[in-house]
Image (cartoon, rainbow, N blue to C red):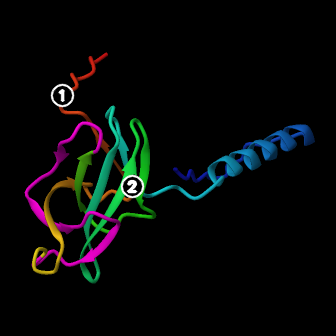
Amino acid sequence: MSTTAASSSSADFFVTSSTLRRFLGCAVLGAALLGAGPARADLRLCNLTAGKVGIALGYRDPQGWVTEGWWDLTPKACETLLKGALAARFYYVFAVDYTRGGEWSGRSLMCTRDSEFTIRGVEDCLARGYDRNGFFEVDTGEQKSWTIQLTDPNQPAAPQP
């Protein structure tokens, strides 16, 4: 949104009451549309595959490393993983394809378990009774809102217009 400053000049303005009402009506409508609700700033993940997937998320908060899971996403669905403005630049994702098998993983090792979880720390996963999986890194570029799109690696790329 930009702000424009206007300076006064010696030009005379003649505004009728109907013109003023229209202007005020447009200003109120514009303010209502712009202020219709707070801007959404979330971390979202969209499952663009044909299968049901499970999502685990890793990130660093003020107390240290956290991993959370599982979000179950049906094909072509999106889910908000974290609500509000993003506090970190990097997030880490591990995903499992429940329908066809396989996973989306990476080199960042973090703790998970089979059932719903929130785990503090990424060290000694196995000794603490957790599983250990490789998460792939997502660089949000310090944006306040980000959407991750999980795609099928076997699906051909869509043609570019």
Q: Amino acid at mark 1?
A: Asn
Residue at left offset 33%, top offset 31%: 50
As drawn, the residue found furthest toward the bottom would be 63
Query: In the figure, residue 99 lies in which quadrant?
Result: top left
Read off the magenta span.
98-124
Reply above or below: 15 against 64: above
Distance from Cα at disc 2 to Cα at disc 1: 28 Å
Q: Position of residue 113 (x, y in %)?
A: 24, 66
Mark 2 / mark 1, whichever is N-terminal: 2
Name the disc covering residue 154, or none: 1
Q: Secondary structure at mark 2?
A: loop
**Is 143 or 94 nearer to us in this picture?**
94
Is residue 40 toward the left or the right of residue 58 in the image? right
Query: In the figure, residue 102 lies in which quadrant?
Result: top left
Check disc 2 and report the residue beneath it.
Answer: 145
Q: Amino acid at mark 2?
A: Ser
**How many circles with numbers are drawn on the protein?**
2
Residue at left offset 25%, top offset 62%: 89
Residue at left offset 17%, top offset 77%: 129
Reply above or below: 2 against 116: above
**Is 20 or 161 nearer to us in this picture?**
161
Query: Tag 1: Cα neighbours inside 10 Å, few (<14), some, or many (≥20)?
Result: few
Query: Tag 2: Cα neighbours inside 10 Å, few (<14), some, or many (≥20)?
Result: some
**Is 9 or 143 nearer to us in this picture?**
143
Q: Secondary structure at mark 1?
A: loop
Q: Nearer the viewer, mark 2 or mark 1?
A: 1
Q: Position of residue 15 (x, y in %)?
A: 85, 41
Is residue 127 toward the left or the right of residue 1 in the image? left
Q: Position of residue 146 (x, y in %)?
A: 35, 52
